[in-house]
Amino acid sequence: MSDKHLIRETIARRAEQEIESGFYVNLGIGMPTLVANYLQKDKQVVLQSENGLLGIGPFPTEDELDPDLINAGKETVTAIQGAAFFDSAESFGMIRGGHIDIAILGGMEVSKNGDLANWMIPGKMIKGMGGAMDLIHGAKRIIVIMEHLSKNGKHKIVNKCALPLTGKGVVDRIITERAVLDVTDNGLKLVEILDGSTISEIQAATEPNLIIEETLLNQ
Amino acid sequence: MSDKHLIRETIARRAEQEIESGFYVNLGIGMPTLVANYLQKDKQVVLQSENGLLGIGPFPTEDELDPDLINAGKETVTAIQGAAFFDSAESFGMIRGGHIDIAILGGMEVSKNGDLANWMIPGKMIKGMGGAMDLIHGAKRIIVIMEHLSKNGKHKIVNKCALPLTGKGVVDRIITERAVLDVTDNGLKLVEILDGSTISEIQAATEPNLIIEETLLNQ
Amino acid sequence: MKQIHSSFQDAVKNIQDGSTLMVGGFGLVGIPENLLLALVETGVKDLTIISNNCGVDDWGLGLLLKNKQIKKMVGSYVGENKEFERQVLAGEIEIELIPQGTLAERIRAGGAGIPAFYTPAGVGTSIAESKEIKEFDGKEYLLETALTADYSLIRAIKGDKMGNLVYNKTARNFNPMIAAAGKITIAEVEELVEIGQIESDQIHTPGVYVQNIIVGHQEKRIERKTIKQI
Amino acid sequence: MKQIHSSFQDAVKNIQDGSTLMVGGFGLVGIPENLLLALVETGVKDLTIISNNCGVDDWGLGLLLKNKQIKKMVGSYVGENKEFERQVLAGEIEIELIPQGTLAERIRAGGAGIPAFYTPAGVGTSIAESKEIKEFDGKEYLLETALTADYSLIRAIKGDKMGNLVYNKTARNFNPMIAAAGKITIAEVEELVEIGQIESDQIHTPGVYVQNIIVGHQEKRIERKTIKQI
């Protein structure tokens, strides 16, 4: 599975399964935004955008284009029927107050205890954390989606993050193109294999020792 | 000046002079509400009601009566052209944030350093402080209007309040039917005599030693 | 998308003895009249009620009070209610009085994930007893904590089937913050409209805060009818 | 009732070197375009700017940046701007990055007279360094203080002569809180209407927060035009 596009699609399709009908969902900038493309039609899902919109719709046609209507990634969007606009304080009240069922975010590193690093690389220009630090403490469930290994083949799922943290102990589940891993009180638990790898291959690509879901051992 | 009605009118008319054109004003429940009746027509004044209205209008006619439109005293009112409705958190943000130019409140006792007691009498049923404790810390200028002496002829302007405080060092000016007194760093200052009393008569009706405005000494 | 009830009894039936309830309204304006009437019928008791006022003797929260369903009342002004006074003096009810702005802000904080904040209201008074005091720019402030509830009962003039709400005039008051601060929020609306019929820029409470909706005709009793003297 | 300007130069002429300015907007959406253009013309310098972003290289706050009028930038994301990066690396500008929700809440607190509040954002990260940490219900939170400004520059789609404002869609963003947090707030509105023409229940920013108004035609540049793939 070397094709970048296929990897992103695999991850996005699996992440979509985390979303239940009736959920209010915040999708982070980048790969998480793709998840919306795979949302099953029978699910009633409302997408929140932290710049002040509950009910993101599809990208606009040229006719629908409205410069005053963007998502948190600053892309022009539309709003669904029944959407609500509000200010940034209300938006983050909604996020911090636990009213968003799930946030799906990208990651650079995740540690075995659920620490997340996804906002800066020392030595590179700091761009800012935007709303990520608020989201990870606010949404009821935090899913990080990312490639299992870095471009250079290094571990991104680690014992301890080397990069500056976005938050400590905040991640509930990691979804990569290879596997689904849960952060548990006892450590990282491998709960699903997505690409047909063996358990030992996934363990090799993951720095922390993995607890293995029993059903996987019996396969 | 024994007539209750005349006393209240004297106080309300003098309090009206504290209000400049362009001011946003909060009038407390009871006597302060009367001040609105004496507002000079050429002044542009917006009255705030802490239950969520900026722009209180006159009492309604029977035709205008709307049960969903009341002031903080729970009286039915109208709203002026250009009035705004908002929630209680916004309303008290507006108050605490220093956006109201002046609040005119009633008082039971005021001390020489500007402490105010106006919300409970020990031994009597506690009704609650409502918005008074927020108002006295929020509005830019706090005027207390009250009769100079209690029904029993006791001091209400005192060295130290005997009643439980609403707030410490919050009052800027006291207006009674007899006098206008300012709370200064050096103590209470008599700045105006309203009913033709002598300075010594006012001093006798006031527990703290008064500083006397120079212009009054020369009269 | 939201649970839309047709019976008020049904809408409040999960509320258990000992629950903490927030109830919208200022005086009798903006109170969820029919939800309160249904609560009286259920007879659920030992309630902690968080609401600015406690109704009057024969309407609103006063009905729950008369029926001895309230264990503790948290509000800013309860002076309109003789039965309240009787129960306090008889030691039948607990009471916690909070400055109105602090009450509004503590409820907002509860809905907005702010565990605590500083405010000047109450400094130097009995309200400050046992509270942490801190100076900012040479002025003292009290630390106040967030309030939340098991159930929030609110009233709006209009709602849509996604739970978006609009309030009328001063009937807005505490309702928007209370909507956000309840684990389960039940909205009594005067009119229920189809999704899309409330303009997105004019929604006061986004539907995310509302779990249950029911349509109710409002009596809107007036506490102090004041008419222009002509 | 409010000062209504006809010249943008006039509207910003009192802003002095070294002032702290809050500027509404998220990305290029909801920014006071013409007020910013006028500020570039005045050449006022050593400004501290509080705004979620810092424009792009040739529009919005980016124009002030290019003209070296900004001494310090306080925001949550500045990644759209190459000149910003250059000035940071050259030590020509100070930068303070704040989580977006904390930024919004600190500005709200500034306008609402709350000197400080606790929030979970940033706990366990470099943001927490030198900040007071306190536990509530077994979870850690950071103490964050209010932000205010000498001048607030905002944009609304509609305003009336009492200063009441209405915003359009996601162009609302930080504008309402910034309106309240400035000592002097200057509102650039797309349309100015007579008093009474904005419905009282639909006002987003009550006029009490606004001191100056000016009508301006907006270019509304789009940062990332994304169109449906059909």
Image (spheres, coloured by chain):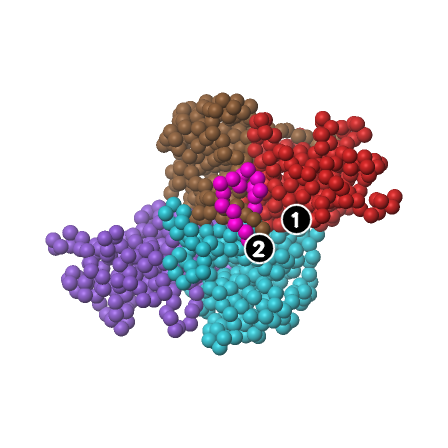
Chain colours: A purple, B red, C brown, D cyan
| Horizontal and vertical percent position of residue A82 | 45, 48
| Horizontal and vertical percent position of residue C135 | 54, 51
- Outermost residue toward the right? B219
| Horizontal and vertical percent position of residue B115 | 65, 41
Marks 1/2: CA–CA distance: 17 Å
**Dot 2: chain letter:** C
Residue range highlighted in magenta: C120-137
Task: Name the kind of residue labelled 1 in the image.
Answer: Lys
Residue A28 tag number: none
Q: Main secondary structure of the magenta part?
A: loop
* Residue under the point 80% across and 46% down: B213
Residue nearest the viewer, comparing D224 with A111: A111
Residue with the mark numbered 1: B140
| The C terminus of chain D sits in image quarter | bottom left
Residue C137 tag number: 2
Instruction: Mark 1 vs mark 2: tell me if same chain.
Output: no
